[in-house]
Amino acid sequence: MLKIHDSYSDKDVEIKSKEIVLYVCGLTPYDDCHIGHLRTYIGFDLLKRVFIYQGAKVFHIQNVTDVDDKLIKRAKELGKNVLAIADYYEYKSRKLFEEFNIILADAYPRVSQYIEQIIKMVEVLLKKGYAYETETGVYFEVDKFKEYGRLSKQTKENLLKHRIEVDKTKKKPYDFALWKKEEDLIFWESPFGKGRPGWHIECSAMGISLANKITIHGGGRDLIFPHHENEIAQSDSYLGRKHVENWMHTGHLMIKGDKMSKSLGNFITVEEALKKWGRESLRMFFISRKYSSEVNFDEENIREAKASFYRIINFIESLESSKGGERRINKEIEELRQGFFENIYNDLDTPQALSHLFEFIRRINPIVEEIHRTDLERSLALLKDILFILGLDRFYEERKKKLEVVKEGVEKILKAREKLRERKLFEISDEIREGLEKLGIEVKDMKKGSTFSLKEES
């Protein structure tokens, strides 16, 4: 049974349901996405893959905030339509995330498509007495929601003292906007005047419209306050019950000791990172760290991740090419199965899970040619399950297809080379190996002939 750390209760909880509604806060697509976003979406992709592996039915929602102050500002800078800018960057980002083998969401609701539902929600909150109207907008009255601050673990006063909006029309400085009365580049008619929704009400309306209850709601840790704290207040007040069962958050991504963010100007776009380091290295880097931990991003760590990825793939390829022997490794296989899954099911502890995988590789690699065919097949089946959960399966399959293309020709060359080696014509056989390496094919001489694999991509 999978356990996750629930940010709301600050406890580890078991997820027992076989029907999962997963809501992950999506992008505000006013610019290129960065690797902080990538870290979050890989983390939740890992979670989703575990549920799928366990046989659960997953309905995955990832919203698109296409109505926002940042988008309006960008539209003014570029002289373009707000929604057109959102469409462009959202499509571009989604295609980039697909490169990393992130399974697409089932629904991508956009704020602009849910204005009617947002207005209805604001009306109900007004009617219930949780909200009030002023000349500048409609605001949620935080003091009316007694559980406010439970997610972020702070009092309203301590939490909000550095986040006060200058608006004298509000009852309290920490009350937050449900509807802004502004006729800017994008606005709608409403019973409370022309304007647009506040940021927090958008996710609540989309989530409630698409799901009666959300099993896990998540995003980056920086969304805990104010966004997710405010979502809880307005959603639960509107419904009269809890809408989200569990909250889950990924840790901060650090660049040279500072949290990466666009406001600090120290961000790396996904597009830049993909070109520089490659998808396999980046995915391996993020899954090598626990999703909830603070992670420092640097090139040395990326190089280590790349080496780890190829260590796994090369090991699997050596198992596949082994002709087999008589040695049984049932104990080692079961130790890997137990160690890997115990840690994955313990709040997605990938560092510990991977340590069991690399220990298995360390012990088995020297004896690959001696292993019984049955245990080779059992090892490969388990390793392919592990690849799926880690999201490395697509990279492995694509590499395997490339190998299949050249397999027949290379095997003929290796057979001819083996005859040269039998005649002790090592100089010629070495020239053949060097020639293959220039073509991106690495040859490894074994006791029983030679094997080959694709060289690591630079």
Image (cartoon, grey):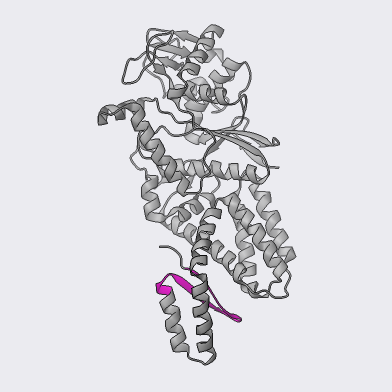
* Residue 437 point in image, percent of width and height: 43, 74
* Residue 188 point in image, percent of width and height: 39, 15
Asked if residue 313 lies in the magenta stretch, the reply is: no
Which residue is at 64% across, 68% downward? 363
Quadrant of the snapshot with the N terminus:
top right
Q: Is residue 300 left or right of residue 359?
A: left
Asked whether the viewer can see residue 130, the reply is: no
Asked whether the viewer can see residue 74, the reply is: yes
> The magenta stretch spans which residues?
437-454
Which residue is at 45% across, 27% downward? 110
Res. 259 image quadrant: top left
Quadrant of the snapshot with the C terminus:
bottom left
- Work out whether residue 109 or residue 225 is closer to the camera in this orientation and state it: 109
Q: Is residue 434 left or right of residue 343?
A: left
Asked if residue 443 lies in the magenta stretch, the reply is: yes
Give the main secondary structure of the magenta stretch. Answer: strand
* Residue 270 point in image, percent of width and height: 40, 46
Which residue is at 37% across, 54% downward? 276
* Residue 384 point in image, percent of width and height: 62, 57
Res. 9 image quadrant: top right
Looking at the image, residue 75 lies above or below residue 436: above
